[in-house]
Image (tube, helix red, strand yellow):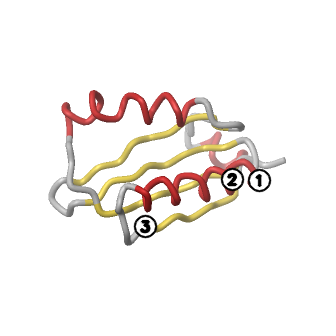
Amino acid sequence: MSKTLLQFDFPFQGPWGAEMPAAMEGLAADIASEPGFLWKIWTENAETGRAGGIYLFASPEEAEAYRVKHAARLEGFGITGITAHAFAVNDALSAITKAPL
């Protein structure tokens, strides 16, 4: 099994910055309990109105299961224009460049 990086990006109207943790704490706890989940970096750009994240999963299958679940959840919130990409992780090169693997 190889680790899989999953990238989500979508239109978002806030909250931003210091206000985001209070609004997203429940979602963060749910994400942290996903099978195969290793970590997430939350991304936000208030200027362009986009948010998302970079996730690391233990396997491609677990990343794909989460991609399907999260895309459906976002669509349920009325969010459209969602992009999601999955990438295999090259552990050897990532270790050289100090990735938190």
Tell whether 69 sits left or right of 58.
left
Of the image marks 1 and 3, the number of the one nearer the N terminus: 1
Which corner quadrant of the image does residue 85 belong to?
bottom right
Q: Residue at x 52, y 33 (%)?
A: 30
Near mark 3 (Cα within 10 A), the count class, few <14, some 14-19 or many ≥20, is: some
Between the residue at mark 3 and the residue at mark 2, the CA separation in whole angstroms equals: 16 Å
Q: Which mark is residue 93?
A: none
- The residue that label 2 is drawn on is 65
Q: Are marks 3 and 2 in contact (CB under 8 Å)?
A: no
Between the residue at mark 1 and the residue at mark 2, the CA separation in whole angstroms equals: 6 Å
- The residue that label 3 is drawn on is 82
Q: Position of residue 43 (x, y in %)?
A: 35, 48
- The residue that label 1 is drawn on is 61
Is 13 drawn above or below residue 16 in the view shown?
below
Question: At numbered mark 2, what does the secondary structure look like: helix, strand or loop?
Answer: helix
Q: Position of residue 46 (x, y in %)?
A: 18, 53
Tell whether 11 sits left or right of 15.
right
Q: Amino acid at mark 3?
A: Ile
Q: Position of residue 62 (x, y in %)?
A: 72, 48
Near mark 2 (Cα within 10 A), the count class, few <14, some 14-19 or many ≥20, is: few
Q: Residue at x 20, y 38 (%)?
A: 17
Which corner quadrant of the image does residue 79 belong to?
bottom left
Q: Are marks 1 and 2 in contact (CB under 8 Å)?
A: yes
Between the residue at mark 1 and the residue at mark 3, the CA separation in whole angstroms equals: 20 Å
Q: Amino acid at mark 1?
A: Glu
Q: Residue at x 20, y 63 (%)?
A: 48
Is 63 drawn above or below residue 9 in the view shown?
above
Q: Amino acid at mark 2?
A: Ala
